[in-house]
Image (cartoon, coloured by chain):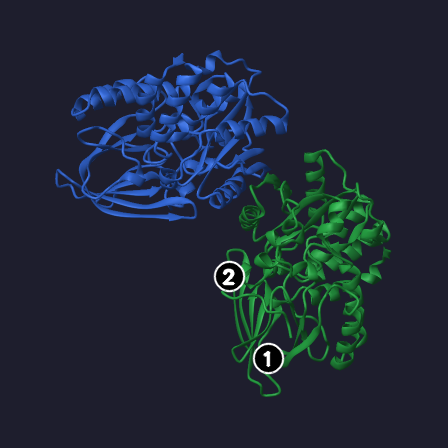
Chain colours: A blue, B green
Amino acid sequence: MRILADNLIPMATGAAFLATGGGGDPRYARLAVQALLETTGPAEIMTLADLPDDSSVISVGMSGSPSVGIEKLPNGLEPLWAVRMLEDHLEIKADALISFEVGGGNSLIPFLAAARMGIPVLDADGMGRAFPEMQMETFSIYGVSGSPMAVVDEFGDGGVLTARDDVFGEKLLRNIGLAMGGECYCAQYVMTGEEAKRVSVAGSLTLAMRVGEQIIHHRGNLEAFLIALAETLAPTSYGQLQLLGQGKVVALDRQIVGGYDQGTVGIETFDGRGRLELLVKNEFLVAELAGERLCMVPDLICVIDVETLEPIPAERVRYGQRVAVLGIGAPGILTTEKALPVVGPRGFGFDYDFVPLG
Amino acid sequence: MRILADNLIPMATGAAFLATGGGGDPRYARLAVQALLETTGPAEIMTLADLPDDSSVISVGMSGSPSVGIEKLPNGLEPLWAVRMLEDHLEIKADALISFEVGGGNSLIPFLAAARMGIPVLDADGMGRAFPEMQMETFSIYGVSGSPMAVVDEFGDGGVLTARDDVFGEKLLRNIGLAMGGECYCAQYVMTGEEAKRVSVAGSLTLAMRVGEQIIHHRGNLEAFLIALAETLAPTSYGQLQLLGQGKVVALDRQIVGGYDQGTVGIETFDGRGRLELLVKNEFLVAELAGERLCMVPDLICVIDVETLEPIPAERVRYGQRVAVLGIGAPGILTTEKALPVVGPRGFGFDYDFVPLG
């Protein structure tokens, strides 16, 4: 399908929703892609089914602290530079690009390179939401290596690096990003079309667009939005939708630690059930109500404004905001025996097993 | 000249002396080169005069915290890997290698690659002593770029990176080294033979060997050593030699901060002149006696055991050691108008101008 500048607002809105608080605010990426499409004409989204098995696919996106991304603006060419650097290193040409994660700015960043290269972005991603570390990519979990990776900043600093595994690759990338001011751009996960079909979350970009359209359409009517969202999610690989609570933000603890946003958000529920507490590491990871765990990674915890329905990234949560907290069952690819040790609670250092929502 | 395993002990001893406390303990590099030369046969040191102007020269060495290097041993192949990676990236072949710095382990590390490659190491280096940061290379000061640089660790992790300038290159390299456990190996400063002659400190490896021979020869006789050393330095570009003081180490403050060893050493002088204080950032940077500055970077401050004359690296200074502290005027290439802002006191954050020794 062809993506016009007009499609980008719903897509960015849905991507912010699916980001579960992380992934970086898509506003800047959206503005940059909009401006670019006015020059290049429409971009193209390709479904996985249309992708030839022998194609070359490269994933590209931003790595770093989302709250740094609010003040340290990219020049817009970084994704192209990173992809070209990796292509040159491997002496290949990419036939399509794919997002690291549908959540946040990284959903749109591949368009900044793809539109200039005249190739499509796949309707798929490597997380089906947002996660803070690269070994949490479904690409990585199901056997595609994150090395070699091309890393760049807005000055063109950087190069192509190889790491012994993706856990070390993440450490290397994070430290380079810190040197580069807290964020950097990276092209990696070179795979064939056949691999892309096997290791990615299908349909996630168009899902983001539909969710965004519903948010925009149902502004001011949380109930109607929840009904429409449940219907949209039903035929996908995502699980059930549940309203975890509504309330007012009354406590906020947020720091940048080692290149990540970390902290907690406390929400006093309107219905007197007590305090809903969200644990954050770039994303909302666990929702607890009065000490009881309601929802945990890899299930999605999405925070929206009760009135505007606008998704709220973790770094933009403010004292006094009135929010609704939704839980959504993770796509099946994230809850397998292979995926859970990496993207389940223990992958984030919590000392308990994954219990699915509901 | 041909370097046999037997030449390495004096060379490593002299390199430890010229390191002014930094550069990493040369013991491990010396043992690794000794073991290698038993397989490959003698290594070759080439004087700058014998180097054709159109040769390709590459510099290679270790970057990181010297005190990490004591416990995190290399596998010995890192320098070769780094040089090969840079050669492949640029599609060139190095005709000779050159040390980052004559001080410490980095004096010998190029032999680990050169002996395997069958090419010589130049009798020269990029510091004439040791310094903690790459923009302090004479290569960098006089216009050879530190980019591209090939960075590797003992697992073969790494790659080739480019930085906008050497100050940022240092930051990038230091952060990558931190991800790699506190140290990494790097090949960089690709230059022609003509450039190498213009931007490096000539004769430093053979100077290290002569100084080491004198230390070994005069053990137990500080006075005789000082006379011999003054004679050795006289015809070189180094300045005058001065005994700054003898005393006992009575205070020690040492931390690893951001990948550097930082701290101070307090020495109670035997002659009752008060406390000699040495300020450390990997190297001994400033020597003060009772608040008066006696010697400062880029002049050399060398600490040796009063009896054995063995040079003492900053990370091995211990409470109760009886030491002599020597000052040596820096080579002329380090005290020019171009060099002093980088390697003089202000380059290290001190708020005063360079005052030469004596």
Disc 1 packing (10 Å; few <14; some 14–19; many ≥20): few
- In percent of the image, x 72 and y 55: which residue is there? B125
- Residue tagged by mark 1? B320
The answer to which quarter of the image holds residue A144 is top right
Residue B181: image tag: none
> Foreground: B285 or A297?
B285
Q: Is residue B65 visible?
A: no
A268 horizontally vs B103: left or right:
left
Q: Quadrant where the N terminus of chain B lies? A: bottom right
Q: Chain of mark 2?
A: B
Mark 1 and mark 2: Cα distance apart in space: 30 Å
Q: Amino acid at mark 2?
A: Gly
* Whole-percent x, y for residue B233 in the image: 76, 69
- Do pointers 1 and 2 mark residues of a single chain? yes
Q: Report the chain holding disc 1.
A: B
Which quadrant of the figure has residue B20?
bottom right
Asked whether, in this view, residue A252 is left or right of residue B355, the answer is left
Q: Nearer the viewer, residue B138 or B302?
A: B138
Q: Which residue is mark 2?
A: B349
The secondary element bearing badge 1 is classed as loop
A238 with respect to A134 (left or right): left
Kindly identify the amino acid type of the residue bearing the numbered disc 1: Gly
Foreground pick, B154 / B42: B42
Which quadrant holds the C terminus of chain B? bottom right
Residue at the far front in the pictured view = B337
- What residue lies at 65% left-to-right and 55% top-to-bottom? B73
**Count of number-bearing discs:** 2
Observer-nearest of B292 and B171: B292
